[in-house]
Image (tube, grey):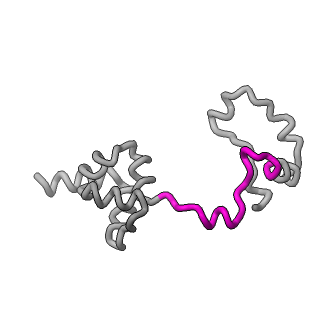
Amino acid sequence: MKSADTTKRTDERAKASDTDWSAFDAMTEEERHRAALLDPDARPMSDGEWARMRKTPQAKIIRRALGLTPEEFSTRYQIPLPTLADWEDGRSQPDDPARAYLRIIAHDPEGVQKILKLRAG
């Protein structure tokens, strides 16, 4: 792990907390990295652990980002629910055209929905 991987959160949730960041800010990158390695609850993963991790399927990431249930996503984008479930559970992978379709959905979900409605009506 690179020392640059250990960073302080600066989003709104972190700003709203009561955490005193002065001790963290006073640490060098090397000290932060060493502290992270020693923390059993938030220890960085080894290369071997990363290699064993299963990637979250793209379909699930897109669906969750849109705030849709599997049923809603399946209906809205005309993807059979069993197919979507297989993709999300890692039992199968989308083929090249399906991956392209998922990229288009991710880029312009409203546009895809609008086109599908026009073609259906």
Magenta stretch: includes residue 10: no
**View extreme (left): residue:** 121
Q: Is residue 116 above or below residue 17?
A: below
- 41 or 1: nearer the eye? 41
In the rendering, at what x and y percent does residue 48 appear?
68, 66
- 101 or 88: nearer the eye? 88
Q: Can you tell which quarter of the image residue 8 is in? A: top right
- 41 or 25: nearer the eye? 41
- Quadrant of the drawing holding the N terminus: bottom right
**View extreme (top): residue:** 18
What residue is shown at x 27% (from left), y 54% (from top)? Answer: 81
In the rendering, at what x and y percent does residue 43 appear?
74, 50
- 92 or 105: nearer the eye? 92
What residue is shown at x 86% (from left), y 37% (from top)? Answer: 23
What residue is shown at x 42% (from left), y 54% (from top)? Answer: 60
Q: Is residue 9 left or right of residue 36?
A: left
Q: Is residue 106 left or right of residue 51?
A: left
In the rendering, at what x and y percent does residue 11 appear?
64, 38
In the rendering, at what x and y percent does residue 15 appear?
68, 32
Magenta stretch: includes residue 39: yes
**View extreme (bottom): residue:** 96
Q: How many marks?
A: 0
Q: Can you tell which quarter of the image residue 101 is in? A: bottom left
Bounds of the magenta span? 36-56
What residue is shown at x 36% (from left), y 54% (from top)? Answer: 108
